[in-house]
Amino acid sequence: MYAKARAHTNIALVKYWGKKNQELILPYTDSLSLTLNEFYTTTEVTFNAELIQDSFLIDGQSVDSKNEQKLTHFMNLVRQQSNCSLYATVNSENHVPISAGLASSSSAFAALAAAASKAAGLNLDQTQLSRLARRGSGSATRSVFGGLVEWRKGNDDETSFAVPVDEQVDFGLEMIAILTDTRVKKVSSRSGMQNVVATSPYYPAWQQVVANDMVAMKSAIVKKDINLIGQIAEENAMRMHALTLSAQPSFTYFNADSLVAMSAIKDLRTQGINCYYTLDAGPNVKVIYQHTDRKAILDALSTKFSKQNLVVSLPGPGIEYLE
Ligand code: 2P0
């Protein structure tokens, strides 16, 4: 009972920020992301009658108790679905260019959902797989598919899953990740979201922002209009980060270099180079642009950031079964 699967990370262009159901991970809003080819997780799962508990190895290291609990909870869901009572060894490797900078729960739980469900004998279709990945981490719902992907919030476990919007992405959309700090963040997404939903007076406005941005973003994708995609994504990201500043207690994921990067992108725009930025629950900045502008953007950014902290990524694929 063995399987091996790979999933790539995704970066949201219209962000998910807040759960209406913590246990099922049902979001308050839809979201839309780009799966990246550069960053991925490969996971092997082996169910074995001789084990007395699950064992997890991530990048060759055992996991801390908080992550162990999260992973065991997820494996219990797989056991329930498959009527399998065996424990498993899980061996996971994150392929990121520099240490932990962009390792993300999106690729981790999508790869685990695929490998564990296949090893347990479940033959899930992509919708079922997306629903299962969602139970591990919200953003993992979208990593089941490649390219541009929409997570429809739904209203229960059956109706909340991702669908592909454009799996090919043949119009030159690229991202540069500007790595400004690769340490583990102080406020986890999970607790940051809970704090925001409970305390930000702007949360109702955010839900309306996302509803509007989803319509505008899907229309921009149909038109293959990278400038419009970038504009909507940048504005959406800033409005998400405004939620953290308006929470009680307030917090921010930005660091000083995040501000330097955002300012550099705006300067490039005033020089006529169309590029836009987005940030997730951390200080690293991702630049959205058309591939013909890659060199000009890299040249400008490398005056402020070291070249090894500028990582170019193209659109990437969905789940791949390796064995
Ligand atoms: C997103 N982020 O849409 C948003 C935007 C970060 C900023 O989803 O609690 O690891 O496991 O569902 O998915 C990161 O949070 O949180 C995230 P959980 P997750 O990509």
Image: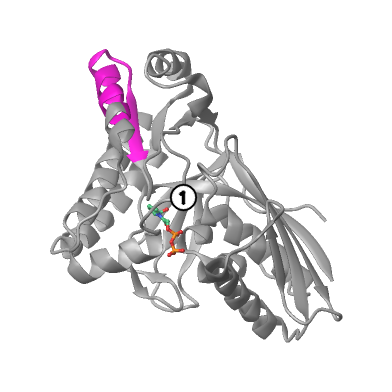
The magenta span reads 261-278
Residue 13 lies, with reference to residue 130, above or below; the image says above
Residue 269 versus residue 311: which sits nearer the camera?
311
Ligand 1 lies in which image quarter? bottom left
Crowd around label 1: few <14 · some 14–19 · many ≥20 (10 Å) = few
Q: Is residue 167 left or right of residue 21?
A: right
Q: Is residue 274 visible?
A: yes
Which SS class for mark 1? loop
Residue located at (37% from left, 18% from top): 304
Residue 207 lies, with reference to residue 274, above or below; the image says below
Residue located at (71% from left, 82% from top): 82
Residue located at (42% from left, 63% from top): 152
Within the magenta stretch, is there residue 276? Answer: yes
Q: Is residue 46 left or right of residue 259?
A: right
**Quadrant of the rendered image containing residue 11:** top left
Q: Where is residue 44 shown, x and y percent of the image? A: 76, 59
Residue 190 versus residue 52: which sits nearer the camera?
52
Residue located at (35% from left, 65% from top): 191
Q: Is residue 172 visible?
A: no
Q: Is residue 190 left or right of residue 6?
A: left
In the rendered image, the quadrant that contains the N terminus is: bottom right
In the rendered image, the quadrant that contains the C terminus is: bottom right
Q: Where is residue 40 shown, x and y percent of the image? A: 62, 46
Name the residue that disc number 1 marks: 184
